[in-house]
Amino acid sequence: MRPIKPGVEVRECSIRIIFRYQGTQHREALRLDSAALPPTPANIKYAKRLAAEIGDKIRLGIFKYAEYFPDSSHARQDTTEKGVPLLFDVMDRFLRVHDLKGSTRALYKRRITHFWKVQLKNVPINQVLYSDILEALANGTWKSAKSRNNELHIINGVFELARIDKHIAENPCVAIEAKKYQKKKPDPFSLEEARLIVAHLKEQRPEQTYNFVELMFFSGLRTSEGIGLQWSCIDFRKKEMLIEGGNVYDEETDTTKTSQARVVKLNKIALAALQRQKAHTYLAGGHVFHDPKTDEPWKYRTITDVRGFWEMALKKLGIRYRRPYNMRHTYATIGLMSGAKPAFLAGQLGHSLRVFFEVYAKWLSSSDDEAEMAKVDDAIGQKTQNKPKTDFRPENEPRTDE
């Protein structure tokens, strides 16, 4: 056996064409009337032309296996002539047609490019098996079960698009169970810690930073909502602000996380922070808070960067690190411990009551436990003192069961 040229292999009694198709290398013997084509000079020259032709058609995406090798088992598996698209083409279409936020689209594109297009072969999408998806997930290195579930969610969307477009009969991802994981519980700061952080920033940082953090601690806004807050949304007369958008990964959005606008009432501390901030950005309009280093609206990553002012302040104060988002949890738990009604706080935070109770059940319980137990004690004591007489025997009549 001696190779003549890439794409053609001459054997003792036959000639084979070597080519790569749909991510796999193939070797197909040339035949004439079901018999192997002998390796004569003329046949070898023909094989070279055929190999070049096959290579061109594969590059153009118009190669049909059965036209060249009808007796091959691969010809029976090749379904591209029936209009079934390749997996990678469906992935690309999924990214194009879905209405995703810019940050979400960028994340999906990264994961599809750097994980799914590496783990799966670019074959007709109806040839991808349930076991192929499982094997890909098993090859991944996940920070948590939630990360693995997020990856599954992306590829499930790709196959669901193919199913709805009727390229496949069933979505192979449907049978794959999401991993169970323990949701992170709120990790709020205490009121004392919040006051220490605000006081430290007041002394050590520009006023705009101090104003921003104080508002966040005492308004319950999401980090993205605070960064994206506009002066046009502040009503000083009514002491409230309209929250209808934000800034997520430095992309301005016109919707909140729950896609519902809400009105947030301003307490005295939050209102004072906004009053002070007027001196810096009010006349210019637009964003309420600017990064004092750049005099431009805060960047999302500047606030959330663990190496930024936030981590430095916590280290200086000896307070255990928690991400800035926990300022929101701090507002909620302080409100509960002070006796504010859950329905009011849920509205301030933009939660449904169901979600609010699920997230803050621990603080709902602890804030009411003593008061509720006092009610039980009062009821028990009252019933004991006023217990009606149930034994109607005469006082001196002995009991028959004694």
Image (cartoon, rainbow, N blue to C red):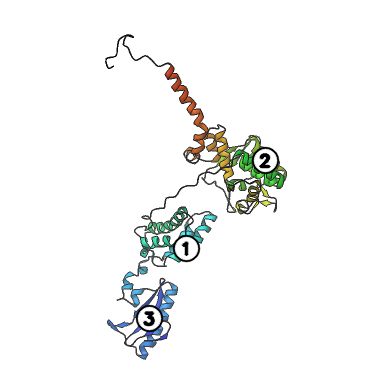
**Quadrant for the N terminus in the image:** bottom left
| Residue type, label 2 | Ala
The Cα–Cα distance between marks 2 and 3, rounded to whole angstroms, is 75 Å
| Residue placed under numbered mark 1 in the picture | 115
- Label 3 Cα crowd, 10 Å radius (few <14 / some 14-19 / many 20+): many
- Label 1 Cα crowd, 10 Å radius (few <14 / some 14-19 / many 20+): some
Residue toward you, 201 or 328: 201
Q: Eyeballing the image, is 179 above or below 240? A: below
Nearer to us of marks 2 and 3 is 2
Q: How many marks?
A: 3
| Residue placed under numbered mark 2 in the picture | 273
Query: Does residue 233 appear in the picture of this structure?
Result: no
Residue at image point 50% right, 47% down: 184
Q: Is residue 89 left or right of residue 227?
A: left
**Disc on the earlier residue, 3 or 1:** 3
The Cα–Cα distance between marks 2 and 1, rounded to whole angstroms, is 45 Å
SS of the residue under disc 1: helix
